[in-house]
Image (cartoon, rainbow, N blue to C red):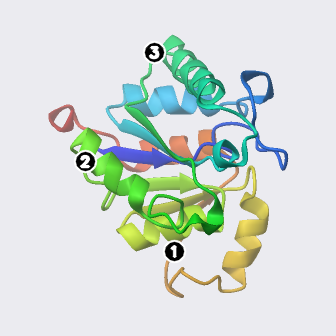
Amino acid sequence: MPLIVLDRDGVINEDSPDYIRSLADWRPIAGSIEAIAALSRAGYTIAIATNQSGLARGYFGIDELEAIHAELCRQVEEANGQVAGIFYCPHLPEAGCECRKPATGMLAAIETELAQSPRGAILVGDSLKDLQTAVAYGCRPMLVKTGKGTETLKALQAGAAGIPAGEQVPVFDNLAAAAREILRQQPVSKDDR
């Protein structure tokens, strides 16, 4: 099955400058859960890759993070879809780890754990770090305007670092719009499932 990698905060759920600290803070963006389920039902493997430095900052613990991810997966399953895996970096930006986007460690983990390469896969994000990660690993970046997307679009238009000048990054209003276009352009054949 073809793979799609999604960022979490600002793509699937509303983002917050104060961090998403608990299930009470977690609010899906309208249409995002249904979009994930539709992609899954169409035969795509869905992986989520998210920076979660709030863990290292002590803003929330692993139990709170797992509760959010369990609810995200529950809602996707309720819509008859499935999330194959959620991968997160718990480190601070200055930690110099290999997993925090724009580093590519989470994509390498996806490749190992799901036995499916993200190279050539679509990666949907709202931040420049998401797009830089996609380009660095050989994924196809897509930008949504939700979350940090509008400011990221301005950075792209100004010639953002880490994105080659000729790189065409498709831009969508939200994940639902991106999913519709993915399904329109690249329907998965039954042989690919």
In the picture as drawn, the residue positioned furthest to the top comes out as 78
Residue shown at 53%/71% (left/top)?
132
In the picture as drawn, the residue positioned furthest to the left comes out as 191
The mark nearer the N terminus, 3 or 2, is: 3
Q: Is disc 2 placed on a helix, strand or loop? A: helix
Q: Amino acid at mark 3?
A: Asn
- Tell me: 190 left or right of 168: left
Give the residue pinned by disc 1: 168
Residue 144: x %, y % from top left = 65, 54
Give the residue pinned by disc 3: 80
In the picture as drawn, the residue positioned furthest to the right comes out as 18
Q: Is residue 164 visible?
A: yes
Residue shown at 65%/32% (left/top)?
61
Residue shown at 64%/58% (left/top)?
92
Vertical order, 159 against 109 (above or below) = below
The mark nearer the N terminus, 1 or 3, is: 3
- Tell me: 73 left or right of 68: left
Q: Callout 2 environment at 10 Å: few (<14), some (14 to 19), or many (20+)?
A: few
Q: Is disc 1 placed on a helix, strand or loop? A: loop
Kindly indicate the quadrant of the structure image that contains residue 31: top right
Mark 3–mark 2 contact, CB under 8 Å?
Answer: no
**C-alpha span from label 1 to label 2:** 28 Å
Q: Quadrant of the N terminus?
A: top left
Q: Amino acid at mark 2?
A: Thr
Q: Amino acid at mark 1?
A: Gln
**C-alpha span from label 3 to label 2:** 26 Å
Residue 161: x %, y % from top left = 60, 84
Residue 154: x %, y % from top left = 76, 74
Give the residue pinned by disc 2: 112
